Image (spheres, rainbow, N blue to C red):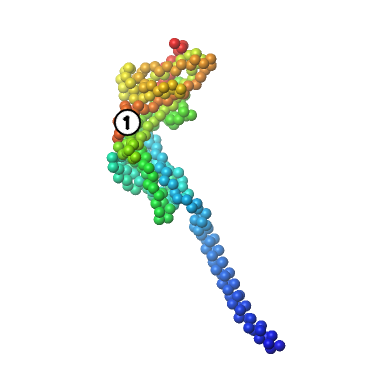
């Protein structure tokens, strides 16, 4: 009987050690789970574990000019691989010097420190932890006290403005002094219009550039009718749009800048013009 008791007694310390280890393991597990839960609640560890492993992109930002007076609007796509975004700006010069203007998690920036008719370059850096990605290619924005006309946005064919009565519009072309990769950056406007022409009739479109006097003078704009060759618009001179079909047809055309008419390689300007459906006549 004593021998049996002795064997049980010899095994007792091992059981105690196992119970102690299991208690320790339970405590550690509870603590780890509590930390994990706390991290999850604060968007910490679990959020970090769930993030993609890829690097942030180096896509250039998008720039919108002539929307708000003497301001440039800059935006960029969200990037779940990035912790924050750093936006840099430089005045447009041959050798631009970029300076930080924004740092944070927003995906847009409104530059209010602008002067009328000045050109600015913007580029974006994305960060993740202690690493930086970029800078992106630079893009150009232009500050102006004159905003886009009320017909915008009609810079895509799908958003063509119906032409009936006389419409007031503006157009712009700007190019940069800076030449990344040996090419100037350009911002230009394109205006699309639609005109309905009855069967076997001809629409006559007239464009008048405000800064030019009289007719027989080439404007700073091209006229492009889908399916035809572009022609430089002559001030106040009718542009024919014939319809040879047996039914009415809606024609779409665009008006856009002649670059050589503007200051190229570090300049540009905004011009105003009027456009109208002057008449509908018989085919010649």
Q: Which residue is drawn at 49% across and 20% down?
A: 196
Tell me the residue that label 1 is attached to.
Answer: 269
- Nearer to us in this view, 264 or 33: 264
Q: Can residue 274 be seen in this view?
A: no
Image coordinates for residue 207, horizontal then vertical, percent: 38, 21
Q: Circle 1 — which element?
A: strand
Instruction: Residue 270 in the image: state x and y as whole percent.
Output: 34, 30
| Image height of 215 relative to 264, above or below | above
| Quadrant where the image shows the C terminus | top left
Residue 12 image position (x, y, % from top left): 63, 81
Q: Which residue is drawn at 44% across and 47% down?
A: 57
Locate residue 200, reporting x and y percent.
50, 13
- The residue at 62%/78% (across/down) is 15
Q: Is residue 205 visible?
A: yes
Q: Considering only vertical position in the picture, is 32 above or below 114?
A: below
Which of the two residues, 190 or 102, is positioned nearer the viewer here? Answer: 190
Res 112 quadrant in image: top left
- Residues 120 and 53: in front is 53
Residue 264 relative to residue 5: left or right: left
């Amino acid at each position: 009987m004593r021998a049996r008791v002795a064997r049980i007694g010899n095994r007792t310390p091992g059981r105690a050690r196992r119970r102690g280890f299991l208690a320790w393991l339970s405590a550690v597990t509870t603590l780890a789970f509590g930390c994990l839960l706390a991290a999850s609640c604060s968007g910490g560890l679990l959020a970090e574990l769930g993030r993609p492993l890829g690097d942030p992109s180096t896509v250039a930002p998008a720039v919108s000019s002539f929307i708000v007076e003497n301001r440039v609007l800059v935006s960029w796509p969200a990037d779940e691989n990035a912790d924050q975004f750093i936006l840099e700006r430089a005045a447009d010069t041959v050798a631009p010097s970029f300076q930080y203007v924004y740092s944070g998690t927003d995906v847009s920036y409104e530059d209010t420190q602008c002067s009328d008719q000045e050109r600015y370059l913007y580029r974006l850096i994305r960060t993740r932890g202690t690493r930086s990605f970029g800078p992106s290619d630079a893009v150009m924005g232009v500050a102006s006290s004159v905003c886009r006309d009320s017909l915008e946005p009609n810079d895509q064919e799908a958003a063509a403005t119906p032409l009936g009565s006389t419409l007031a519009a503006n157009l712009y072309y700007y190019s940069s002094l800076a030449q990344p990769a040996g090419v100037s950056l350009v911002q230009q406007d394109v205006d699309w219009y639609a005109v309905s022409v009855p069967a076997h009739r001809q629409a006559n479109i007239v464009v008048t550039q405000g800064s030019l006097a009289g007719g027989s003078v080439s404007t700073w704009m091209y006229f492009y009718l889908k399916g035809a060759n572009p022609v430089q618009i002559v001030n106040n001179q009718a542009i024919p749009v014939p319809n040879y079909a047996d039914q009415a047809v809606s024609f779409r055309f665009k008006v856009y800048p002649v670059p050589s008419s503007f200051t190229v390689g570090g300049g540009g300007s905004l011009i105003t013009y009027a456009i109208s459906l002057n008449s509908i006549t018989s085919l010649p």
